[in-house]
Amino acid sequence: MSTAAFKLVPAVLLVLACHVPSTHAQPSTGAAQRLHANALASFQKARFPEAYGRLIALADAGHAPAAELALWMYLNGPTVFGRDWDSTPEQLTAWAQLARQPAPTMLARSYPQPLLPVTNRTR
């Protein structure tokens, strides 16, 4: 994680600690609330891949607060976490609808090919 991104983590943790579901969110079951609390605990412990996995499972099941956070993690993955998070266009659209946000556009990213070692052949 870059130094600039690392400085954002306390602010993100504060937002997560104070996160109150929006009024448009559907009521959650006790089980969904516990799973959401587990996802937030994973995030607060800096276990980001685990947190993302938990959030997307809840978001895919229709949990609006989890959809909002999963969408935020997806959109800010490279900047804040130094990585891209996996998702499909269908997931992003569904999460955005749950979070009442515009659906993001997936961008194609290209990554440099690793350099192959040069062998010294002498004959």
Image (spheres, rainbow, N blue to C red):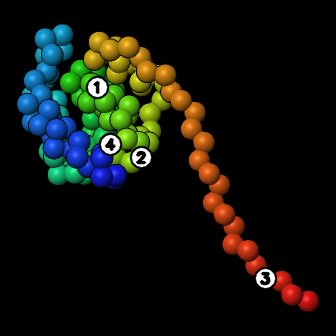
Name the residue carrying label 3.
120
Front-lying residue, 2 or 35: 2
Nearer mark to the viewer, of 4 and 1:
4
Please determine whether, in this image, residue 86 is positioned above or below residue 116: above
The 10 Å Cα crowd at callout 4, few under 14, some 14 to 19, many 20 or more, is: some
Which residue is located at x 83 percent, y 83 percent? 121
Mark sitting earlier along the chain (4/1): 1
Q: Earlier in the sequence, mark 3 or mark 2?
A: 2
Looking at the image, can residue 49 be seen?
Answer: no
Q: Position of residue 56 (x, y in %)?
A: 32, 33
**Residue occupied by mark 4:** 80
CA distance for labels 3 and 2:
35 Å
Residue beneath the point at 12% across and 28% down: 19
Label drawn at residue 83: 2
Tag 3–tag 4 contact (CB < 8 Å): no
Nearest the eye: 14 or 43:
14
Amino acid type at mark 4: Val
Q: Give the number of the disc on residue 87.
A: none
Of the residues tagged 3 and 1, which is closer to the observer? Answer: 3
Q: How far apart are marks 3 and 4 (CA)?
A: 41 Å
The residue that label 1 is drawn on is: 67
